[in-house]
């Protein structure tokens, strides 16, 4: 062929081949660097997700504890209201008895 007959053309074709090989290697290196960047970013994102999930679980536990406390306090309030109702009934009965005693005098 032409390249076999002319050393200049042969040398030019070898140079083009080397440059294209260097370009392929450069692209491979860039692809590898991009891969490592993405892997690092994904690892950071996974760490952030795990951290957020742990924080959410902690907050959920706090909410559950608070709900138990609210339920206990609601029960205490109900007990106090029941006691107050009983005391009000006693006061009303005693007031009525007092009025009845006053009227007997």
Image (cartoon, rainbow, N blue to C red):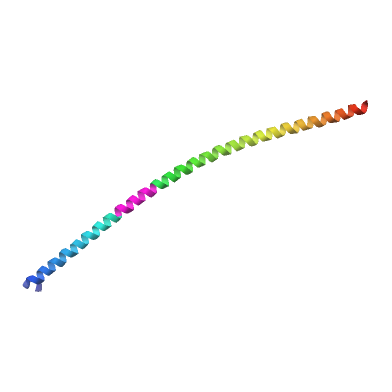
**As drawn, 3 above or below 93:** below
**As drawn, 60 above or below 17:** above
Q: Nearer the viewer, residue 25 or 102?
A: 102
Residue 20 is situated, as x and y percent measured from the top left of the image, at 19, 65
- Please identify the residue farthest to the bottom as the structure is shown: 2
**As drawn, 21 above or below 38:** below
Observer able to see residue 1: no
- Please identify the residue farthest to the right as the structure is shown: 105
- Please identify the residue farthest to the top as the structure is shown: 105
Q: Is residue 101 left or right of residue 24?
A: right
Residue 55 is situated, as x and y percent measured from the top left of the image, at 46, 43
Q: Residue at x 51, y 42 (%)?
A: 60
Magenta stretch contains residue 42: yes
Q: Nearer the viewer, residue 92 or 1?
A: 92
Residue 14 is situated, as x and y percent measured from the top left of the image, at 12, 66
Quadrant where the image shows the N terminus: bottom left
Magenta stretch contains residue 51: no
Range of the magenta residues?
Answer: 35-46
Q: Is residue 22 left or right of residue 47?
A: left
Residue 26 is situated, as x and y percent measured from the top left of the image, at 22, 59
Q: Residue at x 18, y 62 (%)?
A: 21
**As drawn, 56 above or below 8:** above
Quadrant where the image shows the C terminus: top right
């Amino acid at each position: 062929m032409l390249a076999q007959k002319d050393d200049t053309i042969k040398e030019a074709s070898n140079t083009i081949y080397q440059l294209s090989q260097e370009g392929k290697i450069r692209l491979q290196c860039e692809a590898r660097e991009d891969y490592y960047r993405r892997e690092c970013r994904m690892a950071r994102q996974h760490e952030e997700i795990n951290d957020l999930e742990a924080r959410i679980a902690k907050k959920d536990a706090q909410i559950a504890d608070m709900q138990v406390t609210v339920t206990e306090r609601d029960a205490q309030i109900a007990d106090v209201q029941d006691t107050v109702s009983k005391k009000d009934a006693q006061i009303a009965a005693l007031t009525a008895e007092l009025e009845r005693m006053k009227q007997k005098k």
